[in-house]
Image (tube, rainbow, N blue to C red):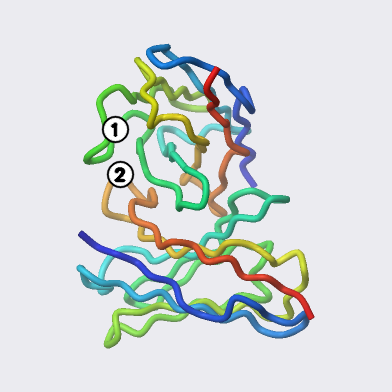
């Protein structure tokens, strides 16, 4: 049973870069699609983007100019960087796996820590 | 972006009831639709994929139907553990998008 665990700061200052890492255990990261999704009270669930083991990425156009997703197959981890954050980026950030069943539905999720943007 | 609209936003029901939640896409997404259940403070969990396929381990009282733009999630006989928020999500077009959620409350 694959497990995903996010790690990173829970508080980020405005204009700085939000950085999170997702560690995958119980399975290899060298297949499937590895996603970031966020959830805020104001905007509900929002897909941020994905990366696969070949480092192919796809980002939500609404965030594309500020987002970078990377992968480290040697550590079974993938990461999110979101630059120039504002209070509107305050949300729970989930990492999730897709591609095991029926296309790219998200079949496994991390716990989704809250990241607050505040000075 | 594809807009996903769920109805109702809130649904009050009793244990044993049969309930239906609707999801409409702003354009055809074929059958590339998933349903998730989310409980407070927890991550969403996949229930249904490709509109009608039950994810492994999900009770058979959950079922999904539809294609194109109109989809339905049905719970045949509500159990206490089913009171939660439900989301639909399309994965036919980028960016992937979610509905706004349906909160299922105890009557």
Q: Are marks 1 and 2 in contact (CB under 8 Å)?
A: yes
Category of crowding for the residue at label 1, using alpha-carbon neighbours closer than 10 angstroms: few (below 14), some (14–19), many (at least 20): some
Where the C terminus of chain B falls, by quadrant?
top right
Check disc 2: other Cα within 10 Å, few if <14, some if 14-19, many if 20+. some
Question: What x and y, as percent, mark residue B97?
Answer: 57, 47
Q: Report which residue position mark 2 lands on.
A: A102
Q: Nearer the viewer, residue A26 or A116?
A: A116
Please tell me which residue is depicted at 52% across the width and 36% down the height of the picture.
B85
Residue A13 shown left or right of residue B23 in the figure: right
Q: Residue furthest bottom?
A: A74
Report the chain holding disc 2: A
Q: Which mark is residue B53?
A: 1
Residue that lies at the very extreme toward the top in this rendered image:
B17
Q: Is residue B8 left or right of residue B43?
A: right
Determine whether A15 is above or below B46 in the image: below
Q: Nearer the viewer, residue B2 or B103?
A: B103
Which secondary structure, mark 1?
A: strand
**As displayed, is residue B26 above or below residue A88?**
above
> To which quarter of the image does residue B31 belong?
top left
- In which image quadrant can residue A9 be found? bottom right
Identify the image quadrant of residue B8: top right
Is residue B107 positioned above or below B46 on the image? Answer: above
Chain that bears disc 1: B
Compare residues A32 and A4 and report the one nearer the observer.
A4
């Amino acid at each position: 049973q694959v497990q995903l665990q996010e790690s990173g700061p829970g508080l980020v200052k405005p204009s700085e870069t939000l950085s999170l890492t997702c560690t995958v255990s119980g399975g290899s990261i060298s297949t499937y699609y590895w996603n970031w999704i966020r959830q805020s009270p104001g905007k509900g669930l929002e897909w941020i983007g994905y990366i696969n083991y070949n480092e192919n990425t796809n980002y939500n156009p609404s965030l594309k100019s500020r987002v970078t997703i990377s992968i480290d197959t040697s550590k079974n981890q993938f990461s999110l960087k979101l630059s120039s954050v504002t209070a509107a980026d305050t949300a729970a950030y989930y990492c999730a796996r897709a591609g095991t069943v029926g296309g790219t539905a998200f079949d496994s999720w991390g716990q989704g820590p809250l990241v607050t943007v505040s000075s | 972006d594809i807009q996903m609209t769920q109805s109702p936003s809130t649904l009050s029901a009793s244990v044993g009831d049969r309930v239906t939640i609707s999801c409409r896409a702003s354009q055809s997404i074929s059958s590339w639709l998933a349903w998730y259940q989310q409980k407070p403070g927890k991550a969403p969990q996949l229930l249904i994929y490709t509109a009608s396929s039950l994810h492994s381990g999900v009770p058979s009282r959950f079922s999904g139907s539809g294609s194109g733009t109109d989809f339905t999630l049905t719970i045949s006989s509500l159990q206490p553990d089913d009171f939660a928020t439900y989301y639909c999500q399309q994965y036919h077009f980028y960016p992937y998008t979610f509905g706004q959620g349906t909160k299922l409350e105890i009557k």
